[in-house]
Amino acid sequence: MTITEKRIQFAIYYNWLGVVYMVPNIYLFLGEADMFMVRPSGYAEEFEIKCSLADYKTDFQKGRKHSKLKILEEHGGGKPIRIPNRFSYVVPAGLVTSVPSYAGLFWYADGRLLCKKHPPLLHKGKWNWDAQIARSFSRRHARLFFAELRKEKGWT
């Protein structure tokens, strides 16, 4: 069975059923989050899913994202900011054995997740995610709606 991003998203979803928000493929702060959740504590977590070693290595070309996560790890803070409180990679078991100090690591195998490195708390700020998530959903819905309308009308 091929390991795909969707299979891993499904495992993340079922591993954390009691969260306030659990959203796949959402654009919020540092580009697209493969899986994003907000815990009842108000802390937000982002999961970056990588199914190949090449994809994992390519992720580090996103310099802005990783420099912000590194700065947060070093300086922390308590002000609400639009950056996740925790950040983790989720990969097929054995694909990656170490990640940057600001990231957690979960292995995926047989439909389950195994925590190999607990993600550190990067900051204690709590952002009100309601408006941000609603805005992202409305944009996604509008894109889908207008793509369907263009197809229906034969517009290019």
Image (tube, helix red, strand yellow):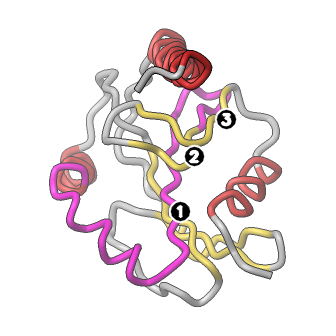
Position of 15 compared to 117: left or right? Answer: right
Dot placed on the residue nearer the N-terminal end, 1 or 3: 3
Q: Secondary structure at mark 3?
A: strand
In the rendered image, residue 59, in percent from the top left (x then y), is placed at 32, 66
Determine which of the numbered discs, if any, sits on residue 35 in the image: 2
Q: Secondary structure at mark 1?
A: strand
In the rendered image, residue 137, in percent from the top left (x then y), is placed at 55, 19
In the rendered image, residue 38, in percent from the top left (x then y), is placed at 59, 32
Q: Choose top left, top right, bottom left or bottom right for residue 30.
A: top left
Tell whether label 2 touches label 1 (CB within 8 Å): yes
- Going by the numbered disc 3, the residue's amino acid type is Met
Residue under pointer 3? 22
Dot placed on the residue nearer the N-terminal end, 1 or 2: 2
Residue under pointer 1? 49
Q: Which residues are magenta?
A: 37-65
Tell whether label 3 touches label 2 (CB within 8 Å): yes
